[in-house]
């Protein structure tokens, strides 16, 4: 009898949305206004003032509180303005920064007339390890819904400003 080990991996979270804004504006609202549309309850710091995505590959992705405290979220893996950005999401299943963890969030912006189709993917969730995957399995629907809520707020702001 030949038994092969099977590995179960977490499926990527994928979302597609349309915003009523040209490609450059859709990209800019995503990157430059994240501190406005990202829900305050999805912060790691109290009294969040800003969310920063440094505009270059290897740039940092972090939030800043009113008192100047900085909390790292990850880094920029690819910067192809205004078509695409890939971010390293380095928050573990407890939403604590882990410099050794690297899941990827890719957002691509596709012009379609007066609108932009935004493709979102959060992948490599299995890199959270066995313990992280166990927690992720418990919250996968919540994480999927969370990204849906967050991206919905982004789409509202991008469409309103287009």
Image (cartoon, rainbow, N blue to C red):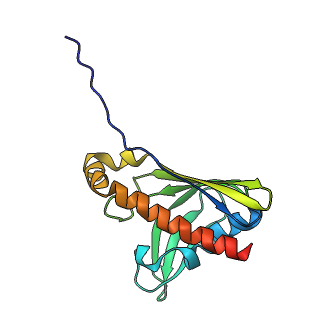
Q: Is residue 150 above or below residue 66?
A: above
Please report the residue visible at 31 percent of the width from the left and 32 percent of the height from the top. Answer: 7
Tell me if residue 98 can be seen.
Answer: no
Q: Residue furthest top?
A: 1
Based on the displayed image, in which of its 4 quarters is residue 99 positioned?
Answer: bottom left
Quadrant location, the N terminus: top left
Counting from the top left corner in percent of width and height, residue 120 is at 56, 54
Based on the displayed image, in which of its 4 quarters is residue 97 positioned?
Answer: bottom left
Question: Relative to residue 79, is residue 87 drawn left or right?
Answer: left
Counting from the top left corner in percent of width and height, residue 155 is at 61, 68
Quadrant location, the C terminus: bottom right
Counting from the top left corner in percent of width and height, residue 157 is at 63, 74
Please report the residue visible at 76 percent of the width from the left and 55 percent of the height from the top. Answer: 111
**Number of numbered markers:** 0
| Residue toward you, 80 or 109 | 109
Based on the displayed image, in which of its 4 quarters is residue 30 positioned?
Answer: bottom right
Question: Relative to residue 78, is residue 72 drawn left or right?
Answer: left
Please report the residue visible at 39 percent of the width from the left and 59 percent of the height from the top. Answer: 143
Q: Residue furthest left?
A: 1
Please report the residue visible at 25 percent of the width from the left and 50 percent of the height from the top. Answer: 134
Counting from the top left corner in percent of width and height, residue 95 is at 36, 65
């Amino acid at each position: 009898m030949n038994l092969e080990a099977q590995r179960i991996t977490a499926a990527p979270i994928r979302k597609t949305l349309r915003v009523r804004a040209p490609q450059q504006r859709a990209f800019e609202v995503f990157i430059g206004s994240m501190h406005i549309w990202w829900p305050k309850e999805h912060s790691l710091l109290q009294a969040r003032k800003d969310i920063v995505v440094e505009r270059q590959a290897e740039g940092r992705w972090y939030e800043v509180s009113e008192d100047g405290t900085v909390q790292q979220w990850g880094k920029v893996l690819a910067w192809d303005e205004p078509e695409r950005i890939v971010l390293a999401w380095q928050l573990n299943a407890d939403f604590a920064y882990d410099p050794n963890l690297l899941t990827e969030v890719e957002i691509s912006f596709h012009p379609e007339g007066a609108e932009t189709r935004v493709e979102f993917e959060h992948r490599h969730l299995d890199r959270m390890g066995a313990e992280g995957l166990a927690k992720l399995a418990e919250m996968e629907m919540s994480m999927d819904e969370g990204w849906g809520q967050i991206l919905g707020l982004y789409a509202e702001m991008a469409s309103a400003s287009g």
